[in-house]
Amino acid sequence: MRSHFLLVYVLISVKLSPKIFLTTTGKQILYNYYLIPLKMLITEFRIILPMTVEEYQVAQLFATAKVSKQNTGGGEGVEILANEPFVKPMAEGFLGKYNTGQYTNKIYHLGSRVPSWVRYIFSDTSLSMHEEAWNAYPYCKTVLKNPYMKENMIIDISTLHVPDRGESENVHQLTGDELKKRHIIYINIADKVSRADYKPEDDPEKFKSTKTGRGPLLSSEPWYKTCEPHMCCYKLVREKFKWFGLQTRVENLIMSQEERLFRNFHRQLFCWTDEWYGLTMQDIRALEATTVDELNKERATGEKKGFTTEE
């Protein structure tokens, strides 16, 4: 999934005391990370949805554009640098066969969305995340980095969309050692969310599609075992955060926020079914083209809006 606006500002805003970062002389940053070889965490999220793999290709791109517009304004939000076709040699293809698709390069400008003490510590250019994504559907690869942390913080997300109910054991072709490290989390989009994340219009338990008849999805029932059509997003998240004294807390935060992001995004995606159902990929490319202009305009002249982090 290519929309990481919620996650990227949370990563910069770890709620730790500023004393961890500041010396007695004031605004002097402790830049020495004491880099230590760390094991990369591996978590696989499995999200079952009542739609086909073909429908999800349109739904995901539509929802990504809409979420980006909801969270951009006043100098902050999403900046799209590139959105263009790519072709790799088959030998370099993802999983050995997915070698063509759409490449995107984005910057998430965080600004005031992080606590004030974080803005005091980091420069403006550090309050951003850079994302590269290769959408070789049904496979997608997304890599997120921070210009301040460089190679010391990487979030690598591999996604494969499969017409099953989440029962495939190793769609990402992990090695034996990787399988031992992998933690699997199933996400039910009908489950309750926090009060801060809840919106009635984005509640699968309340939504019924007029175009498809799908829904509502009740958290009290195993709808994911019987829904037709069906598919599963297998999202493999590898994360690395090298900063002595912070890595464990930040790594746990990253994974918890990934789960939150995936759940909220797919709740919205399902509840927007009547908006994207029936659209073609040509419609989506036209939407993406206008979205670039809208985002640029909103960042330049619009008001700040969207997610914020508590102090």
Image (cartoon, helix red, strand yellow):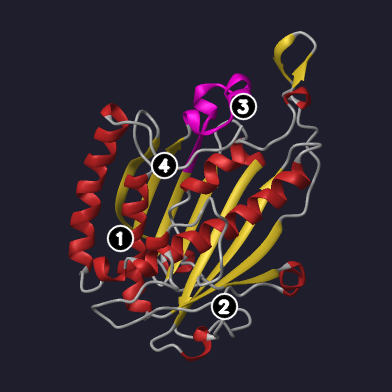
Q: Is residue 122 magenta?
A: yes
> Quick one: label 3 or label 2, which is nearer the N terminus?
3
Estimate how packed mark 3 is, as few (under 14), some (14 to 19) or many (20 or more) residues with alpha carbons within 10 Å: many
Q: What residue is rendered at 37% in x and 62% in y? A: 201
The mark found on residue 306 in the picture is 4
Please give the residue where the numbered disc 1 appears in the rendered image: 62
- The alpha-carbon separation of the residues under discs 2 and 4 comes to 35 Å
> Quick one: label 1 or label 3, which is nearer the N terminus?
1
Q: Is residue 16 left or right of residue 145?
A: right
> Quick one: label 3 or label 4, which is nearer the N terminus?
3
- The alpha-carbon separation of the residues under discs 1 and 3 comes to 33 Å
- The alpha-carbon separation of the residues under discs 1 and 4 comes to 18 Å
Secondary structure beneath dot 3 equals helix
Observer-side mark, 3 or 4, equals 4
Closer-to-camera residue (91/258): 258
What are the residue bounds of the magenta stretch? 111-130
x and y percent of residue 133 in the render?
43, 54
The mark found on residue 133 in the picture is none
Observer-side mark, 2 or 1, equals 1
